[in-house]
Image: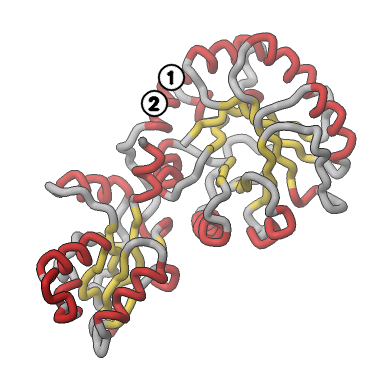
Amino acid sequence: MKISASIYSDKQRPLRKVIQDLVGHQMDLLHVDCNDDIAVFEDIKNIRDWCKTPIDLHIITDQPEKFYPLLIEHPVEYITFQFENLSRPLVIPEEIKGKKGLAITTPTSVEVFENYSDMDFILIMATIPGQSGGVFDQKNFSKIRQFRKSYPKKSIHVDGGVNAEVSFILRNMGVSSSVSGSYLFGEASVGNALMNLTQREVESQYFVKDFMTPLEEAPHIKLKGAKTKEILECVENGKMGFSLVLGENGMLHGLVSSADIRKALLLKIDNHQSIIPEDLINTDPISITGSATVNELLKKIKSCSFPVMYLPVINEEGNAIGIVNFVHLIKGEI
């Protein structure tokens, strides 16, 4: 996951010093907030003279057309317009280069992206736009899942409340870029904050149930009466590489993954028609409770002697309530 540094969050130093510090720490992107102020492009012009780091421009305005000539004259790598401020449909001239995105606040549904599906990404504002130091609103975890499901080929960017604990969760959810401002400049140094944002081990006040894929959104099937073909279809149609298997009263009975299917086929390759549901199901998967913290989740993963791709989530009674999928995290770390 790329880190986009909000350059105006440092109020203590001249802009050139801030940029030099960020470039020296090999920051991925420079996030420039533009609250309906064309003077921002003077800073963009200067930044271009100072470095080659990609610019991530977020424009909040009800008159986007007044920025078009400036964007043509001073192209940036990422351009985002705030949806809630638009008074009419956004039509960006083809001459404007760079990847384009739509920013939405927490109360706005990701469904509004349907009218902007030609754009490259969505920017989810997890705090109030323009207010530095806000707390990440966990409602946005479900919005990220919803957008990922609706637009699997589009990128997701997040801005607001991104600290070390939120950064790990976002990486796990497949977010492409996160904006960091007050946290980045509020630590002892930019380097220290950046290390926290990109490290794999963090302590978290969030619980697994806050960001897991809930049961209703995950492939699952009841064991009672299930046929081999039905289980295979559940894995295939779920498009996530697995299916949870539920016993009586929603108790977690087991997990069927692509690896479990391969093992069953190898075991009965000469008589594959004899495969029964019990051959496919891992009845002893590693699982975790929804009330566990991210730190407890990481400790559990590290204690395993084998790679964990899917981690079923249960409640205190052993009922399946969701799953944590590590595919996006692994992709992002490669």
- The picture places residue 206, in percent across and down from the top left corner, at 39, 51
Q: Is residue 39 left or right of residue 140?
A: right
Name the residue that disc number 2 marks. Answer: 195
Please say if 150 is above or below 169. below
State whether residue 252 is above or below residue 211: below
Front-most of residues 256 and 263: 263
- Crowding at mark 1 (Cα within 10 Å: few <14, some 14-19, many 20+): some
Above or below, comparing residue 158 to residue 35 in the picture? below
CB contact under 8 Å: marks 1 and 2 = yes
Q: Is residue 215 left or right of residue 7?
A: left
Residue for point 78% across, 24% down? 40
The amino acid marked with disc number 1 is Gly
Tell me where residue 123 appears, x and y as whole percent.
Answer: 62, 45
SS class, disc 1 = helix
Q: Is residue 111 left or right of residue 308?
A: right
The disc labelled 2 sits on which kind of residue? Answer: Met
Q: Residue at x 25, y 78 (%)?
A: 251
Label 1 sits on residue: 191
User: Tag 2: Cα neighbours inside 10 Å, few (<14), some, or many (≥20)?
Assistant: few
Q: Position of residue 268 (x, y in %)?
A: 11, 71
